[in-house]
Image (cartoon, rainbow, N blue to C red):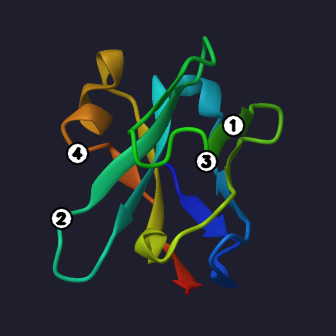
Amino acid sequence: QVQLVESGGGSVQAGGSLRLSCVATRNTLDTYCMAWFRQVQGREREGFAYIWTRSGLTHYIDSVRGRFTISQDNAKNTLSLQMNNLKPEDTAMYYCAADYTSFCAGVRDGHPDYWGQGTQVTVSS
């Protein structure tokens, strides 16, 4: 069992920046990957960035690539998300996720093993 605790959400104007953090209660190197998802009310939860914890290889969807950066500090069991040039369409509840499934299959199919409780990000125009 692992718990994930996010922090860092808030309200910002378009063009601004926020940094989210997620602290895990277990060694993040035990996972295959960790990820960030987001969800707008009434829509499916969307995985938009993930990192292979042992290699550091990252993956982003097109809408956030170049603006968001996912990173990890395995010594602190922490996953971070730096979000720059935020847009109103980035407004959502943001969730940290941990996946122990081979090849990050859980993240890639939208069903990682563990979720955080979420943190709200609101971007105003």
Is there CB contact under 8 Å for labels 4 and 2? yes
Left or right: residue 73 versus residue 102 is right
Callout 2 crowding tier (Cα within 10 Å): few <14, some 14–19, many ≥20? few
Q: CA distance from mark 1 to mark 3?
A: 10 Å
On residue 44, the disc is: 2
- Give the structural element (helix, strand or loop) at label 3: strand
Residue highlighted by disc 3: 68
Q: CA distance from mark 2 to mark 1?
A: 24 Å
Answer with the quarter of the image where residue 44 lies. bottom left
In the rendered structure, which amino acid carries the disc numbered 1? Ser
Residue highlighted by disc 4: 110
Q: Nearer the viewer, mark 4 or mark 2?
A: 2
Residue highlighted by disc 1: 71
Q: Is 25 or 64 nearer to us in this picture?
A: 64
Is there CB contact under 8 Å for labels 4 and 3? no
Callout 4 crowding tier (Cα within 10 Å): few <14, some 14–19, many ≥20? some
- Give the structural element (helix, strand or loop) at label 2: loop
Is there CB contact under 8 Å for labels 1 and 3? no
Query: At which x and y percent is residue 112?
Result: 31, 43
Query: At which x and y percent is residue 51?
Result: 53, 29
In the rendered structure, which amino acid carries the disc numbered 3? Phe
In the rendered structure, which amino acid carries the disc numbered 4? Gly
Q: Residue at x 61, y 11 (%)?
A: 55
Q: Residue at x 46, y 62 (%)?
A: 95
